[in-house]
Image (cartoon, rainbow, N blue to C red):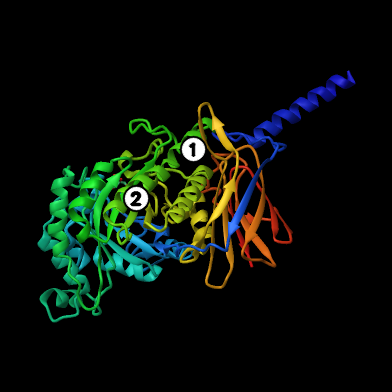
Amino acid sequence: MHSRRSLGALMLLFVLAVCFVTKPGITPARPQNAEPYKATLAIRLDQPRWTINRNIYGHFAEHLGRLVYDGLWVGEDSPIKNTRGLRNDVVSALKELHVPVLRWPGGCFADEYHWRDGIGPRDKRPRRPNASWGGVDSNAFGTHEFLELCEMLGADAYINGNVGTGTPQETMEWIEYMTSDSDSDLANMRRRNGRDKPWKIPYFAVGNETWGCGGQMRPEFYADVYRQYATFIKNHAGNRILRLASGSHDDNYKWTEVLMAEAARHMDGLSLHYYTLPTSNWDKKGSATQFGEKEWHATLVRTLRMEEFIQRHSAIMDKYDPQKRIGLMVDEWGTWYDSEPGRDMGALYQQNSLRDAVVAGVNLHLFQKYGDRVRMANIAQMINVLQAMILTDKEKMVLTPTYHVFRMFRVHQNATMIPTDLSTPEYKIDNASVPSLSVSASRDAQGRVHLSVVNLDPKRPAVIDTTLFGGAFKSINGEVLTAREINAVNTFENANYVRPATFEGFEKRGAQLSLSIPAKSVVMLELK
Ligand code: AHR
C-alpha cells in the first residue's frame, strides 16, 4: 500500500515536471547530462588580417508591414513617447547596437517609390498604395524623417533608388535635393522644408532585385540601365557617393558575371541577396516557432550555403576586379518563415527564436571571414519584418534573440580580423552535416581580443582547447545567449525569456584556455 502511494506520488511529480518544462509549442529541453564533444582552436594573433568593416552589421528598413509605420514612426501626436514622430523606446534600443548603416526605402518598395511624395508638410503628402506589400502609404515617413533617424542612430544612410518606375532625372534630382549646398531650386526647397545643411549620403543603389520585382530585367539589359543611372549619381558639396548595382541572389552566377563584365568600371559595390528558408520551399517555408531538431538542423544547413554563395560570387568578381575595389554587399539576408498564423501574409511578421540567434551568429562570422570582399551586409529587416531585431505591439516592445547577438557582436565592428584554426566534429542528421561550432576573432584598437563562438549542436556542449599564438592575456570575461528550448522566444508577456547572461565556462592555463560552451548557444568572450 505504502509503496503504491509513493509510486503514485512519483508519477504525479513526473507529470508536473513534464508540464513545467514543456510549455505548449515549446520543444523540450536537451538532456542535461549530454556528453560534451571536444574541439581545438588556435587564435592566430600573429597573423592579423583586414579591418572588419562595421557595415557588415548593417540594417534594412523597408516600407513593409509594420516596420516603418508602428515600428519606427508613430507620428508626433502619438501617445507613444516619441521624438519628432520617431519612437523613443525603439530608437534607444537600436542605439545600443551601434547601427553602422541603414538601407531604405526598400526592397521591392524602392522601385515604386517617388521621393517627391515624401517631402514637405505631412498633411499635404499624397497617400499611395503600397503595390508591393499592400495597404496605403501615407508618406509621413520620407527623406527628412529617414535621414533624421540615421542621425539619431549615428548610422550612415544607404538609399536604394528607383529604377523600375523611376527615371535617371528623378535619381539625379533626389541626390541634389539631399546633398547640394548650392543656391539651386532643389537645395532651397530642402531648406524651406526644414533642413539647411546638406546631408551626407555615402551609399546609393540603382534599383533593387532588378532581375525580379525591380523590373524582371535580363542582366545584359540591366547592365546598360545601371551604367546610364550611375552616370547621373553626382557628388555635391564634398559628398562622395559609393554607387551600388543591384546584384544577384543565391546561385545566380550569370548575373554577377554579366554585371562585372559590362559595368564593373562604374560601380563601387554589387549586392547579393540570400534568405534562409528551413524547407527551401517558398510555398511552405516552415514555422518560426513550431519546429523540432530536424528543422533546426535543416535551417543551419541552408543558412551555411551563404559561404558557397559568397565564395563563388567573389571568385567571379576577382576575375574582373582582382584588386577587390568593388564590395560584395549582402544587403538582404536572414530567415524567412511562414507568416505568423492569423497575421496579414504581406506584412512578413515572424517570431524570432534561439534558432535565429544561431543563424545570425554563423552568418556574421562568414561576413567577417570573407571581409576582404564583403564590405556590407544588411539583415532583413530591422523591426516587425522577417528576422527582426525588435517586435512591437502598440506601446510594447520586445528585443529578439537576434537583437542580443547584434548587441554582443558589436565589439567586432572596425576591429582587426584575426584568423582562427578550428577543428570540430560535424553535427549530422541523415546525410547532411554542418560543423558543430563556428568561431570568429578580432582585436580592437585597445588591444582587446574578442572571440565569438556559436555551438550549433542543440544537445551537446563543447569543450574547446584554445591556444593563442602571438599574444597573451591576463583576464577574461564573457556573455552567453542560450535557452532551455531550441525554439525559445521572447514575447510581449515574457520579454526577457531569452537574454544574455554572464559566461563563466572558461579556465585559463597560461596561454591555454579551456572553454565549455553550452549546447545551442552564442558566446562572446573578451580577453585582455
Ligand atoms: O525583404 C523582403 C523582400 O525580399 C524585399 O523587398 C525584396 O528585395 C526581397 O525579395
User: Which of the pair 324/55 is nearer the observer?
Assistant: 324
Quadrant of the rendering where the C terminus is positioned = bottom right
Quadrant of the rendering where the N terminus is positioned = top right
According to the picture, the residue beneath numbered tag 1 turns out to be: 289
Closer to the chain start, of discs 1 and 2, is 1
Outermost bottom residue: 183
Q: Quadrant of residue 187?
A: bottom left
Q: Is residue 120 visible?
A: no
According to the picture, the residue beneath numbered tag 2 turns out to be: 314
Decide if residue 35 is on the left or right side of residue 349: right
Closest to the camera, between mark 1 and mark 2, is: 2
Amino acid carrying mark 2 in the image:
Ser
Q: Position of residue 166 (x, y in %)?
A: 13, 55
Separation of residues labelled 1 and 2 (CA atoms):
34 Å
Q: Position of residue 23 (x, y in %)?
A: 60, 35
Q: Quadrant of residue 335?
A: top left
Residue located at (12% from left, 62% from top): 170
Q: Is mark 2 within 8 Å of ligand 1?
A: no
Residue 408 versus residue 28 in the image, above or below: below
User: Which of the pair 128/27 is nearer the observer?
Assistant: 27
The disc placed on residue 517 is: none
Residue 316 versus residue 292 in the image, above or below: below
